[in-house]
Image (cartoon, rainbow, N blue to C red):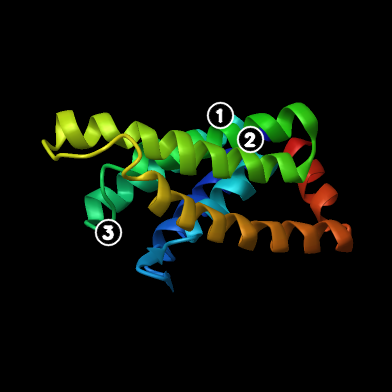
Amino acid sequence: MNNIKKLTTAGVLVAASVCLSAFSIPIGASMCYPIQHLVNVIAGVFLGPAYGVLMAFCTSLIRNFLGTGTIMAFPGSMVGAFFCGWLYQMTKKLPLAYVGEIFGTGILGGMLCYPIAVFVLGKEAALFTYVVPFLVSTVGGTVMAAILLTTMEKMGVLDKMKQMLNA
C-alpha cells in the first residue's frame, strides 16, 4: 500500500508541475519558472530521492512531448530532486533539502547542460552558460517551497502527511 500512495502522490505532483509549468516570474532579463523546483522540494521531502527523480523525469518527458519544455529540463530537475530528497532523507532538516535543490539544479544541473548543448544540440556554450538561469529559477521555486513547507510544519500538517505516505 505504501508504494501505491507514493506513486499516486508522485503522479499528482507530475500533473501539477506540467499544468502549472507556464507560470513564470520575470526577474531582470530572465524568466523564472519556479513550479518544477517547488514540486521537486515537495517530492524530495515527502517521497524521497528515488520518487523525486522519477517525478522530475516524468514531468520533463511530458513537457518535452507537449513542446513546453526542453531537453535541458532533464539534468536540472532530476539532479535537483535527487539531492533535495537525499539530503532530507539523511538529515530530516528542511533547510538542507532546500540547499540540495538549489545546488543540484542550479549548479550541477546547469553544468550538466553543457555537454547536452554542445554534443547533442550542436550549440556553442560555456560550462556555466546555464548555471545563472537555472539558479534564478530554482531559488524562486525553492523559496516558494520553503514558505509552503514551513507553514505546514507550523500547523502540524507536515509530519501527519509524511506519516500518511509512509504508513
Q: Position of residue 117 (x, y in %)?
A: 21, 37
Q: Position of residue 119 (x, y in %)?
A: 16, 28
Residue under label 2, please give it: 85
Q: Earlier in the sequence, mark 1 or mark 3?
A: 1
Local crowd at mark 1 within 10 Å, few (<14), some, or many (≥20)? some
Q: Position of residue 3 (x, y in %)?
A: 62, 32
Residue type for callout 3 = Thr
Q: Earlier in the sequence, mark 2 or mark 3?
A: 3
Q: Are marks 2 and 3 in contact (CB under 8 Å)?
A: no
Residue under label 1, please give it: 50
> Which residue is rendered at x = 70% and y = 57% of the image?
146
Residue type for callout 2 = Gly
Visible in this render: residue 65? yes
SS at circle 3 = loop
Would you place residue 86 above or below residue 159 in this image? above
- Give the alpha-carbon distance from disc 1 to disc 2, as whole Å: 8 Å
Residue under label 3, please give it: 68
SS at circle 1 = helix
> Which residue is rendered at x = 14% and y = 37% of the image?
121
Would you place residue 115 above or below residue 38 in this image? above
Would you place residue 152 above or below residue 9 in this image? below
Residue type for callout 1 = Ala
- Give the alpha-carbon distance from disc 1 to disc 3, as whole Å: 24 Å
Would you place residue 46 above or below residue 50 in this image? below
SS at circle 2 = helix
> Which residue is rendered at x = 48% and y = 44% of the image?
106
**Which of 44 and 108 lies nearest the eye of the viewer?**
108
Q: Are marks 1 and 2 in contact (CB under 8 Å)?
A: yes
In the displayed image of the protein, which residue is found farthest to the left? 122
**Which of 161 and 89 lies nearest the eye of the viewer?**
89
Q: Are marks 1 and 3 in contact (CB under 8 Å)?
A: no
Q: Which image quadrant: the C terminus?
A: top right
